[in-house]
């Protein structure tokens, strides 16, 4: 099926006449924006269902300093909208998949068993992973087959997530449910008096659309990759799900809670706010050096943030909405917290959280340019569609590099293998100390400079847009660490 897209791209290179001959492909004359896909099912009443918390996966065995897990991808029917059954593709038949809790420096091995009718690929988003286990988009696990992914986890504690990464089909396969949370813990973080246990909550946020019978809607092209032309800019759902439930509610005590926020949407960006202070303690790559208090938090697709909300500021009986200031109507809501009890709370947010090494851009061996744009062949990086056989850059192991990213429209850019730090946004340095990131939002007509250092593993990796429709329509580039 990959060859279909390559054949289409080759035809597209012949010009506008060839474009017209390829169904579903057309010359991009503008810059498509994400479009809302309206449900035909009635939208459910907000805050009518409780927040589900995905089960924590248990290792099938532990031996030789490693933990072994098994994830079986299979089709299932679940209740997403109240009273309707929805077919999903899920890890373990659930949406989201089970949460994997691992320890930094302890080898975690995940056996992926594909019981679906399509090939899949597993990617640990934010993982510092050797190339054979990183989920290169053409390293397919065929239907009926299995593959072991080994994650050494030589990295800091952080909120990661795992999802499908199949070339050309990441968008529809994640949309159907192939995503889950992956939490890395370490002694440094556990020594802090942060909220823990039931007050440490993974919240996987995404949007979906539904037909009247509960089926998930998605504007795929039949028998070939890509989406209908109107949705080339990205697909937005009109139902906001948290941990697979529409606009759920969680009953909370008058205490501090740690919310691990993950934007698992295909194309939607959120501006999250509660009306009160959010104390951010972590980013994609783990703890910040010190907490920062904000009134709202912007997350593009693929980004994560850990925040602490202190519900002791509210009275029993009050309700606190987590809202999306970037949305309208129903999409402006995310979930609700109902404060219903007093409980003892010994947690705190210390003034110092961690030591974050600041990479020195003055030591960079090279500055690389990556232009994200639309063109006659779809979504492009440096004017070219993705070709898994072509290497866009070769980086030396251990070298510091500066990468300059530029955009036409908004593109959340995700870098595999190692985290990075944001140096400048349109020439301005961001406020506060450096933070480790693996995904950064390029807004419209913007330039962002990042600094990174590739460590531990040589091999082939990818840089791509995490708007999944852009990614599926060729906005990806391979790089090699030598």
Image (cartoon, rainbow, N blue to C red):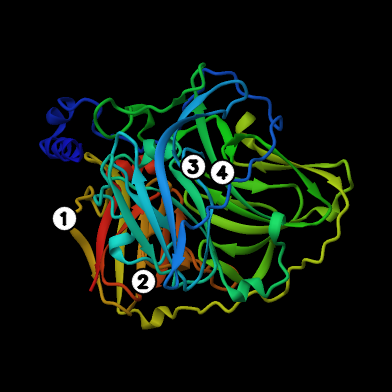
**Dot 3 and dot 4 residues touching (CB under 8 Å):** yes
Label disc, if present, on residue 265 of the rendered structure: 3
Task: State how far apart marks 2 and 3 are (Cα).
Answer: 28 Å
Count of picture labels: 4
Residue at horizontal 71%, vertical 54%?
198
Pointer 2 residue? 402
Pointer 4 residue? 205
Task: State how far apart marks 2 and 1 are (Cα).
Answer: 24 Å
Instruction: Describe residue 281's horizontal placement relative to residue 2 as left or right.
Output: right
Of labels 4 and 2, earlier in sequence is 4
- Tell me if mark 3 has few (under 14), some (14-19) or many (20+) residues whose alpha carbon lies within 10 angstroms of its own: many
Decide if residue 45 is in sight here: yes
Residue at horizontal 51%, vertical 61%?
284
Q: Position of residue 285 (x, y in %)?
A: 51, 65
Of labels 4 and 1, earlier in sequence is 4
Q: Secondary structure at mark 1?
A: loop
Q: Secondary structure at mark 4?
A: strand
Label disc, if present, on residue 285 of the rendered structure: none
Task: State how far apart marks 3 and 1 are (Cα).
Answer: 29 Å
Of labels 3 and 1, earlier in sequence is 3
């Amino acid at each position: 099926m990959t060859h279909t897209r390559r054949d289409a791209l080759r035809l597209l290179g012949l010009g506008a006449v060839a474009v017209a001959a390829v169904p579903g492909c057309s010359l991009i004359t503008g810059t498509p924006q994400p479009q809302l896909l309206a449900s035909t099912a009635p939208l459910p009443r907000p805050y009518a269902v409780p927040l589900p918390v995905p089960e924590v996966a248990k290792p099938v065995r532990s031996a030789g300093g490693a933990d072994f897990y098994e994830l079986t991808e299979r089709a299932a029917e679940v209740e997403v909208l109240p009273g309707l059954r929805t077919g999903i593709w899920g890890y373990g038949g659930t949406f989201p998949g089970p949460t994997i809790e691992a320890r930094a420096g302890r080898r975690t091995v995940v056996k992926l068993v594909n019981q679906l009718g399509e090939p899949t690929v597993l990617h640990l988003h934010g993982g510092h992973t050797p190339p054979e286990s990183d989920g290169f988009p053409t390293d397919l696990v065929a239907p009926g087959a299995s593959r072991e992914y080994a994650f050494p986890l030589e990295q800091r504690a952080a909120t990661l997530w795992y999802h499908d990464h199949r070339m050309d089909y990441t968008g529809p396969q994640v949309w159907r449910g192939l995503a889950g949370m992956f939490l890395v813990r370490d002694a440094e973080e556990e020594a802090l008096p942060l909220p823990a246990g039931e007050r440490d909550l993974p919240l996987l946020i995404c949007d979906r659309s539904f037909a009247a019978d509960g089926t998930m809607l998605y504007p795929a092209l039949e028998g070939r990759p890509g989406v209908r032309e109107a949705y080339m800019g990205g697909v937005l759902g009109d139902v906001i799900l948290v941990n697979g439930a529409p606009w759920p509610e969680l009953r909370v005590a008058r205490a501090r809670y740690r919310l691990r926020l993950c934007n698992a949407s295909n194309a939607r960006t959120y501006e999250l706010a509660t009306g009160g202070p959010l104390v951010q303690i972590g980013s994609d790559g783990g703890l910040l050096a010190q907490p920062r208090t904000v009134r709202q938090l912007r997350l593009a697709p693929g980004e994560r943030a850990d925040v602490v909300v202190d519900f002791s500021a509210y009275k029993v009986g009050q309700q606190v909405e987590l809202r999306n200031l970037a949305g309208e109507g129903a999409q402006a809501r995310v979930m609700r917290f109902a404060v219903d009890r007093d409980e003892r709370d010994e947690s705190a947010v210390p003034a110092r959280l961690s030591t974050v090494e600041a990479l020195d851009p003055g030591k960079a061996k090279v500055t690389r340019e990556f232009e994200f744009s639309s063109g006659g062949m779809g979504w492009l990086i440096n004017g070219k569609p993705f070709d898994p056989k072509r290497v866009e850059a070769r980086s030396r192991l251990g070298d510091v590099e500066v990468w300059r990213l530029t955009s036409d429209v908004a593109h959340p850019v995700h870098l595999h293998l190692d985290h990075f730090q944001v140096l400048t946004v349109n020439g301005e340095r961001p406020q506060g100390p450096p933070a480790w990131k693996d995904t950064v939002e390029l807004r419209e007509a913007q330039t962002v400079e990042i600094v990174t250092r590739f460590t531990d593993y040589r091999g082939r990796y990818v840089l791509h847009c995490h708007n999944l429709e852009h990614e599926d329509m060729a906005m990806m580039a391979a790089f090699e660490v030598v």
